[in-house]
């Protein structure tokens, strides 16, 4: 019974790791349409360092682009509110810095979708070609007083 349980768990782990990924609205889903978080995607891409670098570049672009956009819009809105509510001269340095940060965030955010798509498409191609993350390094046939069996090293 123990042998059957181990064999079934081994086959299930192979089947789940060989599922193709899908992108919907910037989120990554597996074949069962279950949303994968960042750790799960990084685990799947761990055997493919070039694809992992593209995925990490996507995450970095998303982070820095979002920070620039948020900070730029925040500076613009804060300076506008201060200009309307006080008697200070409205376009101050904060307005120009906020505008520059907002404009700078646009090219940063534009290239991120392409990085995600190339990483996921590359992973799906490698899975379709039979390249899975499960590799058997060595197979030995062993025998002792209790019987005979197969030893797998992976």
Image: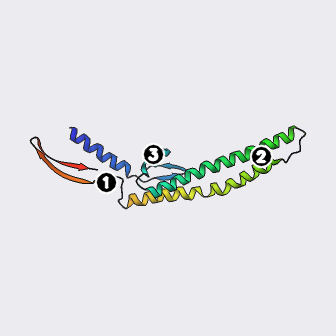
Give the left or right position of residue 44, taking residue 54 as reference: left
Between the residue at mark 3 and the residue at mark 1, the CA separation in whole angstroms equals 19 Å
Residue sitting at x 72%, y 47% = 72
**Image quadrant in which you'd find residue 3:** top left
Residue 10, relative to residue 114: is it above or below?
Answer: above
As helix, strand or loop, the secondary structure at mark 3 comes to: helix
- Closer to the N terminus: mark 3 or mark 2? 3
Residue sitting at x 42%, y 54% = 20
Query: Depth-wise, is mark 3 or mark 1 nearer the camera?
Result: 1
- Closer to the N terminus: mark 2 or mark 1? 2
Q: Residues within 10 Å of mark 3 (few under 14, many from 20)?
A: few
Contact? badges 3 and 1 (CB < 8 Å): no
**Image quadrant in which you'd find residue 83:** top right
Percent coordinates x, y for residue 128 in the rendering: 39, 60
Residue at which label 1 appears: 135
Q: Residues within 10 Å of mark 1 (few under 14, many from 20)?
A: few
User: Which mark, by number, is residue 123?
Assistant: none
Residue at which label 2 appears: 76
- Tell me if residue 35 can be seen: no
Residue sitting at x 32%, y 46% = 12
Percent coordinates x, y for residue 5 in the rendering: 25, 40
As helix, strand or loop, the secondary structure at mark 2 comes to: helix
Give the left or right position of residue 43, taking residue 135 as reference: right
Residue sitting at x 67%, y 55% = 106
- Colouring used for the render: rainbow
Q: Quadrant of the N terminus?
A: top left
Q: Residues within 10 Å of mark 2 (few under 14, many from 20)?
A: many
Percent coordinates x, y for residue 49 in the rendering: 44, 56
User: Which mark, by number, is residue 40?
Assistant: 3
Figure label count: 3
Between the residue at mark 3 and the residue at mark 2, the CA separation in whole angstroms equals 38 Å
Between the residue at mark 2 and the residue at mark 1, the CA separation in whole angstroms equals 54 Å
């Amino acid at each position: 019974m123990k042998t059957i349980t181990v064999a079934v768990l081994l086959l299930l782990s192979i089947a789940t790791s060989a599922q193709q990924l899908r992108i919907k609205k910037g989120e990554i889903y597996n074949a069962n349409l279950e949303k994968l978080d960042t750790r799960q995607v990084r685990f799947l891409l761990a055997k493919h360092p070039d694809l992992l670098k593209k995925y990490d570049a996507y995450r970095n672009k998303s982070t820095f682009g979002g920070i620039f956009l948020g900070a730029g819009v925040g500076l613009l809105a804060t300076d506008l509110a201060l200009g309307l509510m006080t008697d200070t001269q409205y376009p101050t340095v904060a307005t120009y810095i906020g505008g520059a940060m907002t404009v700078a965030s646009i090219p940063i955010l534009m290239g991120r979708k392409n990085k995600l798509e190339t990483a996921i498409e590359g992973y799906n191609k490698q899975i379709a070609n039979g390249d899975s993350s499960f590799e058997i390094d060595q197979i030995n046939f062993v025998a002792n007083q209790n019987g005979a069996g197969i030893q797998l090293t992976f």
